[in-house]
Image (cartoon, rainbow, N blue to C red):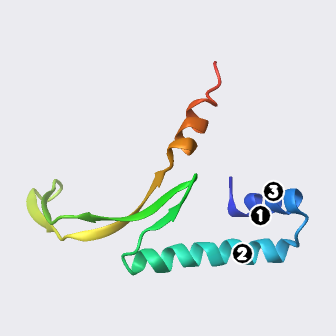
Amino acid sequence: MTKAEIVNEIVEKTGLEKTEVLTTIEAFMDSVKENLAKNENVYMRGFGSFVVKHRAEKTGRNISKNTTIVIPAHNIPAFKPAQTFVDKVKNNVKSK
């Protein structure tokens, strides 16, 4: 599902203007990105958490040149779904 499809679905469910919904979604995404950039986690009860995970420095291999490289420590964004979210997805499995 794309962002445009999400916007259209919300427009159908709420009756709001498409531009209002798009602006709201963009503002939400900007807010999450800004807070994660400041190393602040974003918690949404019943949905999940957007968190910053720290990766320590490690040694890697460049197999094409057969050399060792150092991968510096860095932070990455991650999403951890709430248990109710996980349960809903688990219970919605379709049989083949």
Helix, strand or loop at label 3? It is: helix
Residue found at x 73% / y 78%: 23
Residue found at x 74% / y 59%: 6
Q: Amino acid at mark 1?
A: Val
Give above or below for 12 relative to 70: above
Q: Position of residue 8 (x, y in %)?
A: 82, 61
Q: CA distance from mark 2 to mark 1?
A: 10 Å
Q: Amino acid at mark 3?
A: Glu
Q: Using the rendered view, name the quadrant where residue 36 is placed.
A: bottom left
Q: Amino acid at mark 2?
A: Thr
Q: Which mark is residue 9?
A: 3
Give above or below for 47 relative to 19: above
Residue that mark 2 sits on: 24
Question: Left or right: 17 with respect to 5?
Answer: right
Q: CA distance from mark 3 to mark 2?
A: 14 Å
Question: Left or right: 93 with respect to 6?
Answer: left
Q: Using the rendered view, name the quadrant where residue 60 is placed.
A: bottom left
Q: Are marks 1 and 3 in contact (CB under 8 Å)?
A: yes
Q: Which mark is residue 7?
A: 1
Residue found at x 20% / y 70%: 73
Question: Left or right: 22 with respect to 70?
Answer: right
Q: Position of residue 74 (x, y in %)?
A: 26, 71
